[in-house]
Amino acid sequence: MLFFGAWAFDTSAAADGSLRNVELDGRAIGGRSEAEVQRVVADMAADFGGRAVEIRTGDTTLESTAGEMGLAIDRAATVSAVLDEGRDGNALARPLAWVGSFASPLEVSSSYGARPDQLALVLASLEGDSARQPVEPSIVTSPDGVTVEPGQIGRSLDPAVVEERLMEAARRGEDPLTIEVEPDEKTPKVSDAEVQTVADRATSITSQAFIVTVAGKQAAFEPAELRTWLGFQAADDGFEIVFDGEAIAAAVTERIGSMGDAEPKDADFTLDANGAVQITPAVVGLACCGDDAASLVANALRAGQTTIELEAVTQEPELTTEEAEALGIREPVGTTTEWNGQQQVKSFTTYYDAGAPRVTNIRRIAELVQGTVVLPGETFSINERVGQRTAEKGFVLAGAIANGVHVEEIGGGVSQFATTTFNAAFFAGLPFGEYQSHSEWFSRYPRGREATMGFPNPDLQFVNDTPYGIMVWTSYTETSITVTLYSTQYAYGEQVGQSEEPAGNCTRVTTTRKITYVDGRTATDTVGARYRNGAATSC
């Protein structure tokens, strides 16, 4: 009983630490608290990290340290092993083990761990040029055929083997950690023979000209060009042939070319010699080729075929003949009014002196706008249609107003075209998007009913709020520019009032419009202008 009492007392006294007579790697660590055990293990781990490593391979010795190679004492596992020593096993045998420890200490070995990724990187760095990774065989294409570049056997240390032997040396307590290991030969994953079989197949399927036919048009692709489409990639059973789909599609499309007169064309509108609206029918296009053309060609080549017929792709025009006919573009719309002593009959005309540079610009912008079709719900924008006025587009230097100052600029004078269009839309009863009057009034424009132009603004926009399409038709003479809107009569506008009021250094002009619809409804709206007074440059 006295024996068991001594064991129980001694064990109880070490309840939160290591038992008496425990050694860790030969170092006495018995009777220590858990915190003390942790400090001892931490010191041992630090010492181990600096322990030298020698890897002898042939005539070469690679040198490093345990820490650099990712080897370390597993501190948590080692502390647990120390604290558990003498407390494990059969409960009846524990007192006997305790008494035996006075003659032979309870031995605990450190637990070790490794970081395989770090070890592999350091090992590769230490081997340097002496290590050689295997080189897979490759396939080389040329106009004359397809050949194989043989693979190469690699030779390098196996990180898993090095790790295992270093761990064994650490558990033996070696200092330095010294191991001997021979490099492993590493063969390519794919044999030269397997790759040669694929190369021979690639040579065979590209040994003859390949003919592509699309809607009666043919293109021949010779072996040298076919081989530029070849590619190769690893597969589960070796190598396989792949084709460059983008290269095939581009080559076929370029070689077949357009399908003649079968380019898609939208239905178009024009006026005949008698001023009647004529529709130029749309053309359904044919194009080479479908999205699957490249894969079809590749599959045909794989199958050993030398010809293939591809379907042309139908391309519908954006505006078909039927859609154009349904737009109801058939007659001038608007009303009859008077301006500058001239009757304006469902169109609007403004006048200029012949021969001035600005006339060139007015005519040029009229040519660029002529025939524009504005679909129901769309907004017509002169700037969007014409873009910036440049010399390359045929515009010349002429007078304009910029920030209240008279200047010369490319495209000067086009505001007269904007004013003419503004009035055509005004009397057709169409609402406006963006517009801005000139900063001073010119007698060649209706007062309060005009618009200036710049780029990207001011712009002139009107909105097609009718259920019909609207064609903007322009014409000019030596001394005038005319804008006519063709559609189906839906509404017309009339000027029914105008008022003026001061606005700083300017005069604000408000013009009231009455809009009459074909179903008898009426509505009113206003447009505005603001003109500088006298020599003022701003309001």
Image (cartoon, helix red, strand yellow):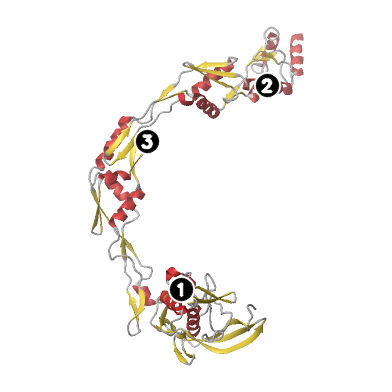
Taking depth in this image into account, of 459 and 81 the one nearest to the observer is 459
Q: State how far apart marks 1 and 3 are (Cα).
A: 69 Å
Q: Amino acid at mark 2?
A: Val
Residue 394, position as x, y percentages in the image: 42, 72
- Residue 41: mark in rendering: 2
- Residue 428: mark in rendering: none
- Quick one: label 1 or label 3, which is nearer the N terminus? 3
Q: Quadrant of residue 111?
A: top right
Tell whether 60 sits left or right of 105: left
- Quick one: label 1 or label 2, which is nearer the N terminus? 2
Quarter of the picture holding the N terminus = top right
Residue 303, position as x, y percentages in the image: 26, 44
Taking depth in this image into account, of 243 and 507 the one nearest to the observer is 507
Against 515, residue 266 (above or below) is above
Against 352, residue 264 (above or below) is above
| Residue, disc 1 | 396
Quarter of the picture holding the C terminus = bottom right
- Quick one: label 2 or label 3, which is nearer the N terminus? 2
Q: State how far apart marks 2 and 3 are (Cα).
A: 49 Å
Q: Amino acid at mark 1?
A: Val
Q: Secondary structure at mark 1?
A: loop
Q: How many marks?
A: 3
| Residue, disc 3 | 236
Residue ID at (67%, 8%): 104
Outermost residue toward the top?
A: 103
